[in-house]
Amino acid sequence: GIILEYIATQGEGGDMPTVAFVYSDTEFGKDPIENGKARAGELGIEVVEEIVTKPGSVDVSAEVLKLRRVRPDYVVFHGYVLSPINEFMVQMRQMGLDTQFMGTFWSSDKLIIDKMGADADGYMGVMPYNYYDSEESGPMLDALRAQAEKSDPEAGYRPTGYMQGWFNAMVWTEVVKRTLDAGKELTGDNMAESLASIEDWDTGGIIGIPVTVRNMSFPVGRIWRVNAEEGRYEPVSDWIHLD
């Protein structure tokens, strides 16, 4: 949803960009596609192609030809960590296509930069947290980095899974605190009620804006783009919070 909100702002002269979804043949890969198509329709974005592959596929030449025929402005990857994203990007660029490639959360890890090098330049993704090596700061983000360095000084960069684990611990600490402060037992129903009550919550820089729970989730993120020369993602949008 956040990716599509961003794409909807990128049209020129009243023309809305076109999109293709490329996703893995897994339950996780297929899960958001119908909702994604519905949201694209609401925003006036035409989904011109859907490609389904096995995760980790290497031979995607036939799928690349399908995309070449429809020439989408954006290709959105979901359900992959790396392959076949790199194969699609390299082959489509070799064909002279100027498609913008984007990935959802797990397809926006630094692994893409580490494995693709200069070929990853310009790739874009959505991330609900600040990257470990971003220029952003805040009391909790600074504490995360300090603890990471203290725990393992040799590890260097921490991946998005590390950021997610820290944030999840923050959420459940807050949920338990709210439940106990209300004088209630730590039951599933009571903790769910506490989770749903989170509104305009300051995460101390883990996420760059105050967040509010919607339908038991934090529907917030930012679009980032790979700067291959610097070896990192850099923000290209404001934080987007879906209602």
Image (cartoon, rainbow, N blue to C red):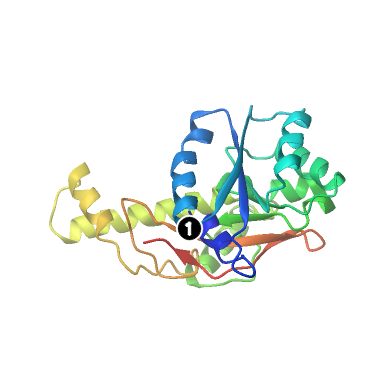
In the image, taking residue 101 as reference, residue 143 lies left or right, namely left
Residue 36 percent location from the top left of the image: 48, 46
Left or right of 53 on screen, residue 127: left
Question: 31 left or right of 217?
Answer: right
| Kind of residue indicated by mark 1 | Leu
Residue at the limit of the structure toward the left, as seen here: 183
Residue 204 placement (x, y as % from top left): 45, 69
Q: In the rendered view of the protein, which quadrant contains the C terminus? A: bottom left
The residue lying toward the viewer, choosing from 107 and 154, is 107
Q: Residue at x 77, y 59 (%)?
A: 231
For disc 1, the marked residue is 43
State the image quarter where residue 91 is shown.
Answer: top right
Residue 180 at what x, y percent from top left? 19, 56
Q: Which element is circle 1 on?
A: helix
Specify the quadrant of the image occupied by residue 147. bottom right
- Compared with 85, 55 (above or below) is above
Question: Quick check: can you spot residue 102?
Answer: yes
Q: Is residue 161 above or below residue 238?
A: above
